[in-house]
Amino acid sequence: MKKKLSFSIICVLFVGVIFARQTNLPLTINGPTSLFLKGQLKGPEKGAPSQPIEAFQSEYDLELYFLSSLNSLTIKVVNEQDQTVYQKTVNAVAGSSLIIDLQGWASGAYTLAITDGLGGYLEGIFQIE
C-alpha cells in the first residue's frame, strides 16, 4: 500500500516538474507535514503497529491514516482557548483514513486528541498560519 502511494506521489511530482519547466513557472512543492503523536492507544490487537495512527497536515486539511482497526475512537481538536472546534467518534478500519477540513479555521495552535475508550490516548499539536 505504501509502495503504491509512494510511486503515485513520485509520478505526480515528476509530471509537475515537467509542467513547471515547460511553462517557466516556479517549482514549489509543499507536501503534507507529519504530525508527531505522543501517547499510546490501548485498543490495537497483538502484532499491530506500535503507533496505529499516522497524522499529516497539509495547507487545507489534517489527514489521519489508520494502520490498525480500532473501535470507538474519539477524534477531537481543541484551539488555543481550549474550545473544541472538531469532534467525531469513529470505528477505524485498517488502511482507511479520516480527513478533517481546515479551510476557514483561524490561525493559531491546535491540539489533536485521540482517545480509545480504554484509557489510551494520542495527542499532537499542529499550527495553522
Image (cartoon, rainbow, N blue to C red):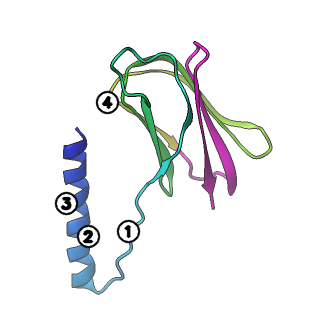
Q: Dots 3 and 2: beta carbons under 8 Å?
A: no
* Res 12 label: none
Q: Residues within 10 Å of mark 3 (few under 14, many from 20)?
A: few
At horizontal 24% and vertical 51% (from top left) the residue drawn is 6
* Res 95 label: 4
Q: Circle 1 sits on which residue?
A: 29
Q: Nearer the viewer, residue 1 or 38?
A: 38
* Front disc: 1 or 2: 1
Using the numbered discs, state the Cα–Cα distance from disc 3 to disc 2 in whole angstroms. Answer: 9 Å
**Residue 106 visible in the displayed image:** no
Q: Secondary structure at mark 2?
A: helix
Which numbered disc, 2 or 4, marks the residue that appears first in the sequence?
2
Magenta stretch? 101-129
The amino acid beneath tag 2 is Gly
Instruction: Name the outermost residue toward the bottom.
Output: 24
The relative height of residue 27 versus residue 12 in the rendered view (above or below) is below
The amino acid beneath tag 4 is Gly
Which numbered disc, 4 or 3, marks the residue that appears first in the sequence?
3
Magenta span contains residue 94: no
Q: Circle 3 sits on which residue?
A: 11
The amino acid beneath tag 1 is Ile
Q: Nearer the viewer, residue 128 or 122?
A: 122
Residue 91 as seen in the image, left or right of residue 25: right
Q: Secondary structure at mark 3?
A: helix
The amino acid beneath tag 3 is Cys
Using the numbered discs, state the Cα–Cα distance from disc 4 to disc 3 in whole angstroms. Answer: 22 Å
Using the numbered discs, state the Cα–Cα distance from disc 3 to disc 1 in whole angstroms. Answer: 13 Å
Q: Dots 1 and 2: beta carbons under 8 Å?
A: yes
Magenta span contains residue 115: yes
Q: Circle 2 sits on which residue?
A: 16
Which numbered disc, 3 or 1, marks the residue that appears first in the sequence?
3
Residue 1 as seen in the image, left or right of residue 59: left
